[in-house]
Every structure is written in structure tokens, then in C-alpha cells.
Image: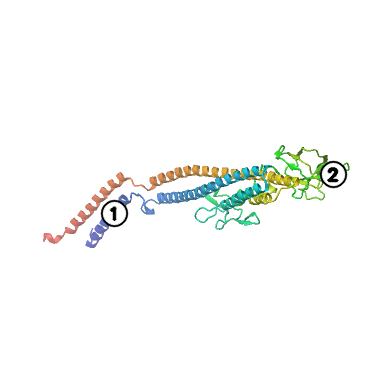
Amino acid sequence: MRVASSTLYQQGLASMNYQQGALMHIQQQLGTGRSILTPSDDPVGATRALGVSQAQAVNGQYATSRNQANIALAAEENALQSVTTITQNIQTMLVQAGNGTMSDADRGSLATALEGLYNQLLSLANSDDGNGQFLFGGTRSGSAPFTQSAGAGNYIGDNSQQLLQVDVARQMPAGNTGREVFMSVTGGAGYVVKGNPANTGTATFGTVSTTDPSNPLFGHALQLSFTANAAGQMEYTITDTSTGATPAPVVTGPVIYNSPAQIDVAGFTFNVSGAPKAGDTLTMQPASEAGTDMFANLQTVIDRLRQPAASENDRANLGNVLSTAVRQFSNSLDNVLTVRASVGSRMNELDALDDVGTNRNLTYSQTLSGLQDLDYAKAITEYYQRQVALQGAQQSFMQIQGMNLFKYL
């Protein structure tokens, strides 16, 4: 068979190019440590490696989100720790204010001290994370969530928590709203009793205790009203004001009042003492309906402490304001501690998720290593084989090129 010289050259060149390309490919593998340089090297392996790489990248994003959440929650915990201390200081001062030996001037000084705590509390409510993002603004974290309006804390944040995707199936609130912290109470806060500021008698009330949360009336707003009967005796009647009906349905009474009287109604109890007058009233409301704004509650106390308490009626009204405030701030402290517990729980969960994420990342890395990492022993062996093959192709081409019939003429 005749073989054209051009064919010999083409075949020889093709053989050398192939061996040269194969050798360069192995050199690239050895240089990168990767067995898959292009999808064509291993289409199935390349597809699997791409999927694992993407999953690992998403896992890294979760880790970043967990770090952000941890920073935010740590900042919130620091702020809440200070809020706890201030609330406890307020409680101490409320007890001091109830000391019957205090003068109007003493109470005025105490009001000034409470005003300082008010300002500290407002400053904490407007805490930021150091980067201009306010901790308690909800999703409106770019502006201060609280302003002061007529002594009350005017919350201008929103009620939506910032959620971060910290794991595959876990979105975690990276903080709490100002309303949750400074304007809420826990579900088990019970009742708060308030005296009517217009009361003219000297009736005061004591601590409220829950006795039967299963009572059908538990959770209803009630009112205790004093009246004088035909014999001139003081009586009280308790009505259910939660229905909005006029007149309000009677729950208890009329009952002859004798000081001190234990009021046991709707699953809670408290004592009333002193000498009420006809027309005096006490309201009994679930804590969630009886003023949960820490700023407004504190301002009420400050304003009352700055008023003189010259008469028995004045002192009774002051005592009732303080009793209400003691209950309100006890509920507020419980709420703050509950929020702090929630923050701590989330931080612990983040630690656990970090461990899971680290292990998951290790698994991804090991899987990628199995798919992509080069078997150096095998590659070096193949490298020398390709090198020998290239040399053989080059030498055979040179020998064939040197064959010529004219040498024999």
C-alpha cells in the first residue's frame, strides 16, 4: 500500500500533539492538585463537586448570619442587663417612697432621682450596636425607636423582628422590639389594682395574689365601688367592666365593708384597709391592660411624688399610686428577665448550630476532596508513561522522516 509523505507527516504530528497535550494535562493536574480541571475530565464527578461546592457556600452564609446574630444578641444582652439593674433600682426607690416618715422635700428628691433613672432607661431603649443600627427598633433599625411624649415612651419602631437565616430550616430573631421589652408583661403577670385619683377617702390596697387562674372571670376587668347603705354603713360592690355593658354586671355585692377587708374574686385576692367614702372606686385589671409602658408608669410616680401629701386622703392616694407602681415594675422586671432568658437561649442555640455547621463544612470538604483531589502516585506514574510515549512518538517520527530511497541510488 502506498502511503503519501504528507500522510506520514500528518500522522506523526497528530501523535506528538496528542501525547504532548496529555502530558501537559497531567502537568496541570500535578500543579493544581486537582484531578478535575474541566467538566469533560469527569462529567459526573464535576456535577457532584459543583453541587457540594454550592452547598458549602450556603453553609458559609449561614455561619456569617450566625455571627451577625450573635453580635446583635450579645449587644442586646448587655443593654438588658443594664435595664434589669435600673428596674431593680426603681423598685428600691418605690419602697423608699412609701416610708411614712418622708417629707414632701424628701419625696421631691426621690422624684429627681427617679427622673435620672427614667432618662437612663430611655437611653438604653435607644441603644445601638455601634454601627448606627438600633437594637430595639425591630425592622426599623435605622432610627431611634423611642421618643418622649408627655412623660410616656412613644414607640415609633415596628413590631416585626429582624430574622436571620442561621441554618437550613432555622430563621432566628436577631433581637427584640422595644414594645416587647419596655411595653409588655408576661402572660402570668396576673392583676394590677389601681385607686381612682379622685377618691376622697383613705382606703388603700395591698399586694395582689393569684389564687385560681381557672376561674371563669379570671382575666376580666373589674371595678370595686364603695357606697353607703341606708344605715350609713359602707358597702362595696364588684362589677365586671370588661363586657362594656351598662350597667356593668354585678360579680359580688353589695357587701358590708369592714377594715381590713380581704377581697377574693375572679381567681385573685388582695386586702383593702382604711376608711373609703361613698363614690370611691378601685379598678382591677389584667396586667396586660393596666398600663405596661415602663416610661408612662414611672412618670406617673414622679409626678405624684412631686405633689404634697398634706392630708390623710393625699397620703392614701400616694400609697395607692406606689402600690400600683410596685406591682407594675415587678411585672416589667419579670418581662425583662424573660426576654433575657430568650436571648440567652438563642445564643446557646447559635453555639450548637455553629458546631453542626462546622461538622457539616468538614463533611463537605471531605466529599470535595474525594471528588477533586489528585491521586499523586497515580498521576506521577501516568506522567512518566506519557513522557515515554511522547519521546517514542518523537523518535519514530524522526526515523520515518529520515527514510529515503534516494540514499540507495
Q: Mark 1 and mark 2: span between their CA atoms?
A: 109 Å
The answer to whether the residue labelled 1 contacts the one labelled 2, judged by CB atoms less than 8 Å apart, is: no
Q: Which residue lies furthest to the right in this view?
A: 230
Q: What residue type is labelled 1?
A: Met
Q: Which amino acid does label 2 sit on?
A: Ala
Horizontal relation, residue 56 to residue 406: left or right: right
Depth order, front residue of 206/338: 206
Horizontal relation, residue 273 to residue 58: left or right: right
On the image, the x and y values in percent for residue 236 come to 81, 42
Please tell me whether mark 1 sits on a helix, a strand or a loop: helix
Q: Name the residue under label 2.
A: 228
Is the N terminus in the top left, top right, bottom left or bottom right quadrant? bottom left
Please tell me whether mark 2 sits on a helix, a strand or a loop: strand
Identify whether 284 is placed above or below 404: above
Q: Residue 24 got which mark?
A: 1
Q: Residue 195 got which mark?
A: none
Picture residue at 78% right of the left edge, 50% below the top: 244
